[in-house]
Image: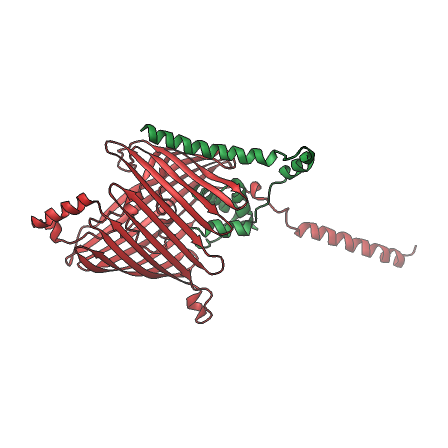
Chain colours: A red, B green
Amino acid sequence: MNDIAMRSTLRPRLSAAALLLAAIAVAPARAQTAGEIKPVPMITGYGGVFANFQPGQQSVNPTITPVLLVPLGQKALVEAEFETEGEWNRTGGVWGPRTVEKGIEYVQLDYFANKYVTVVGGRFLTPFGVFNERLHPIWVKDLMNAPLIFGLEHGSGMGGMLRGGIPLSPSVNLNYASFFSANSTNTLMESERSAGGRWSLFLAKRRIESGFSFKRNLGDERFNSYGGDATWNLTRVPLTFRSEYAHATLGSGYWVEASYRTVRISRWRPLFRRLQIVARMEQFFAPKEAEEGHAEEEEEGEELAMMGPEPAGHGHMAELPEHNTRRPMAGFNYYFKDGLKGSFAWGREMTPEGNQNVWSVGLAYRFGY
Amino acid sequence: MKTTAGLFAGLTLIAALAAKEVTVSANKPTQPGMAASAAITAAIPTPIDGDEAYKANCSRCHLPPRKFAPKKMATIMMHMRVRANLTAAETDAILKYLTQ
């Protein structure tokens, strides 16, 4: 075989080998399956500022809430949320002192016992209703003003909880969270002795969830609280309905909310693809004793009554209204970029004391490192 | 107190039994002749569409979140498994969808 013949034979083989080596070198590693991805510790959370304006009273509430997530292998997770919320009120044209509230919302160990059961120990958000556990972060909630009934469900427990999801059929999941909480008087981690939970049916294909919550307070004052909630994400249009009802000795009430993403409006795309319109109707029914007590205070001409109703459900650490209150609200969110949104809302608060407008603006940012 | 404890225990027991029932029913053939095919079916878990699971579960509370590196996304999914009461299969399917 002469040189020319040898070269003509070797060249294609060398080229093929080179191509093979190159292909091996540049080929991506075998795609990782979900179970092979090792979780790492991270800090996530959210921050923002929220301002509320009512006749004679304004407030500014900056907040920063870091969340620490530390996986212990793939079977357990330690998670903690530390909330710091400032409050600066202006009443009758005079700014009051700035106050800062700090608290540990949760610091818990989650152990994934099996496919359907997670055992939780430590301090956790009370699973009563959906707003407290899922919707309260300012980057999540569609209206910055918390619902009037938020004070009935807001809180954390200290103890143990079993929770998870169980597929009852291919289209229906049972979601459950059952807890027991001990009493704690620690200033950063207050909790009351109580037991209860939330149980819901989730129709994934229809994107409908309906839940029931129950809580029994087992402290010095023993009473039951119960509630219901429903969520419906329409699949054909970017529209979501949410609602909650809660009843306790401290009062009862409901809220119904609709939010619509305007992404499908073809005009003014730069604006509408980032916009969300929200409307909520809500009502709070104060206990009769509270209403009567307040009426007596008014007759005695006490200063408290002269100051007018407290702003209700305006911030995260909401207080319950003193009167029967009805409040329609509407607003919008504008998503500047991923994780950063600006919010604006207007509402009309109607009580036996009188009606007044409520305005709010806010900025929320979600971070993760 | 007794009523509360009973209710708490009852609901937890129902949840635990339901979990057991789902596990057992996945492995139990309905007829003797179907044993082999049932065993094969049980060995292959029903696949969950990650895209569907993501849209159905995550949109219950929030808009699509930003994407993180796979290892961080795995941590976030552990967090969300607890928060949203996801099953292990749903968690894996959503994580796979978000990291591929």
Residue at position x 44%, y 57% from top?
A338
Asked if residue A69 lies left or right of residue A187, the reply is right
Seen from the viewer's position, the closer of residues B85 and A40 is B85
Residue A274 falls in which quadrant of the image? bottom left
Q: Is residue A255 visible?
A: yes
User: Relative to A219, does residue A322 appear above or below in the rendering?
Assistant: below
Asked if residue A264 lies left or right of residue A360, the reply is right
Asked if residue A223 lies left or right of residue A240, the reply is left
Q: Is residue A126 visible?
A: no
Q: Position of residue A222 (x, y in %)?
A: 26, 33
Residue at position x 64%, y 39% from top?
B41
Residue at position x 17%, y 47% from top?
A291
Q: How many marks?
A: 0
Furthest residue in direction right, as rendered: A1
Q: Position of residue A21 (x, y in %)?
A: 72, 50
Residue A33 falls in which quadrant of the image? top right
Seen from the viewer's position, the closer of residues A110 and A96 is A110
Seen from the viewer's position, the closer of residues B25 and A161 is B25
Which of the image's four quarters has the N terminus of chain A? bottom right
Furthest residue in direction top, as rendered: B2
Q: Position of residue A101 (x, y in %)?
A: 26, 45
Residue at position x 15%, y 46% from top?
A292
Furthest residue in direction bottom, as rendered: A267
Q: Position of residue A86 (x, y in %)?
A: 26, 49
Furthest residue in direction left, as rendered: A300
